[in-house]
Amino acid sequence: MSNLPSVPTTSAPPRRNRPPLAAAVVQNLAMAIVTKEYPSGTALPPAGTLCEMFEVSRTVIREATTALAEKGLVSTRQGWGTVVLDQSHWNLLDPLILDGLFRRHDRLRFLDNLIQIRINLECPMASSAADRLTEEDTARLTEHLESMAGLLDDAEAYAAADIAFHNIIHQISQDAFGRAIVANIQSKALNSAQYSGNPKRADLDATHAAHIRIHEAILAGDAEAAAAAMRNHITQSWSRRRPRGE
Amino acid sequence: MSNLPSVPTTSAPPRRNRPPLAAAVVQNLAMAIVTKEYPSGTALPPAGTLCEMFEVSRTVIREATTALAEKGLVSTRQGWGTVVLDQSHWNLLDPLILDGLFRRHDRLRFLDNLIQIRINLECPMASSAADRLTEEDTARLTEHLESMAGLLDDAEAYAAADIAFHNIIHQISQDAFGRAIVANIQSKALNSAQYSGNPKRADLDATHAAHIRIHEAILAGDAEAAAAAMRNHITQSWSRRRPRGE
DNA sequence: GGTGGTAACTTATCATACAACTTATCGGTC
DNA sequence: GACCGATAAGTTGTATGATAAGTTACCACC
């Protein structure tokens, strides 16, 4: 098998010259499990077989299965094997698992679900930001918003700035858990064309207008308006780029 | 160090089902990192030193560091070491990390934050459950609620049934991600006395009454009332058991 | 003073061996 | 035939030693 490349996903700082071999194995097996290639309840091939499949040593295989267990995908029992767990055990926010879910035929169910989670978490965060705003926060948020106006011709750059805009609001809200959850969703889902779509200039203009409205509400200290503006923004932005007819 | 589980001391049966050694190492190191014993940016002791500290082989240490990296606590770089990452990289929903956060001096900040997350996610789930309720769901939810009435004398049993009650609602709502997040919080935080407190009979009576109100709203198909009842329940239940004066 | 090479330390990977656990099978016993 | 214990085979868990590869710091050299 030995599908090497990709080292994907993690934009993590430590850039290695050689990607760890275990990463490829984990990616491959995680994808196979999430897409039901290995049904829950069944056992993965034994370590020795996996060694041959991926042409690596048992050290690497053990590392991979440890990572899979950490993601809640499998559970190993000495003398029994490495059994695939039910979806209810999966760490759904894990980047690799998210990526796998986006490739399933029922991906739209998960995408809609993620948007709902974002609404549930980000609207209260916008409210909280409106309540807790300091002068320093005001300057930072305003400055960033104004810099975004210059990126309306570059969809990719605007998307990155978009995430940063939301992230600033999350920081102001001081909601560490909500921020961690949404950041996970955003940073990893962005790579998926299913999630981020292919925005046109008109889409970016509409998005930017929505950002301005959120900014206004937060600066006015109007918690309710901030939540409403955020809800509108997320809902309408998703309705513009949601894949149709699946 | 070597904080191994207690050994039965008897010579004959060499304790069956011995827990993996790596688990103890992971627990120990994760706790040390979360409680800032190892500050972010610094490197963990090298593998050889850790072997001596925990009296295990490099195999186990390697597995432990893999698990820690999977939790977002550390990042290993060949030739450099295993460096502790900033809190923004941590997987805050991980059971071990949650447990560590609950032992910090600023634990109350995280506990309040978790309650807020639960409110943000569970209220819409209650609404959704009220909208999607089927006859089968009705029977299951009602049956479970009635069985809980008999557990009001056993705080521990009622707490378990409490979680199950919420879980049934989550299932009905069909919000897979919200369910996964809240389930993580609940199942792991329950062990913490800081989170679950020490409920008295009067507390359980009040909680049960709130459960009945939620049940009524959902069965009536009143989404708005269900969300309101859920919000009331979570808020007041927390205000009853929240640690004071920290 | 700058430069390049080298030594020392680190993680990454491999190979091998053995221990511990689980299951199935094959006996023998009643 | 039903029950029960020993055994064998397969699996993960752990230990050990060796080698490869990446990083840093130091030191001789120009």
Image: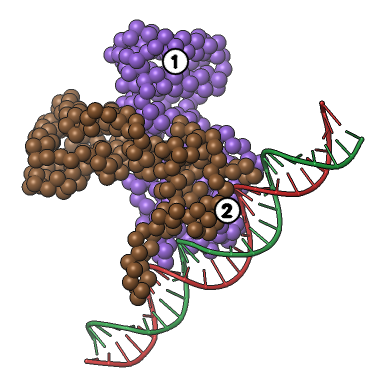
Chain colours: A purple, B brown, C red, D green
Residue drawn at 41 percent across, 31 percent down: A180
User: Do discs 2 and 1 share a chain?
Assistant: no
Along the horizontal axis of the image, is B26 left or right of A151?
left
SS at mark 1? Answer: helix
Residue drawn at 55 percent across, 51 percent down: B49
Query: Residue A68 location in percent, x, y?
Result: 45, 50
> How many numbered marks, from 0 up?
2
Q: Which residue is mark 2?
A: B48
Nearer to me, A172 or A86: A172
Task: Identify which amino acid the numbered label 1 is placed on.
Answer: Thr
Query: Residue B127 location in percent, x, y?
Result: 21, 29
Nearer to me, A42 or A243: A42
Nearer to me, A245 or A86: A86
SS at mark 2? Answer: helix
Query: Residue A10 location in percent, x, y?
Result: 53, 36
Is there any visible trace of residue A42 in the rendered image? no
Q: Residue A207 shows which numbered tag?
A: 1
Q: Quadrant of residue B195?
A: top left
Name the subunit of mark 2. B
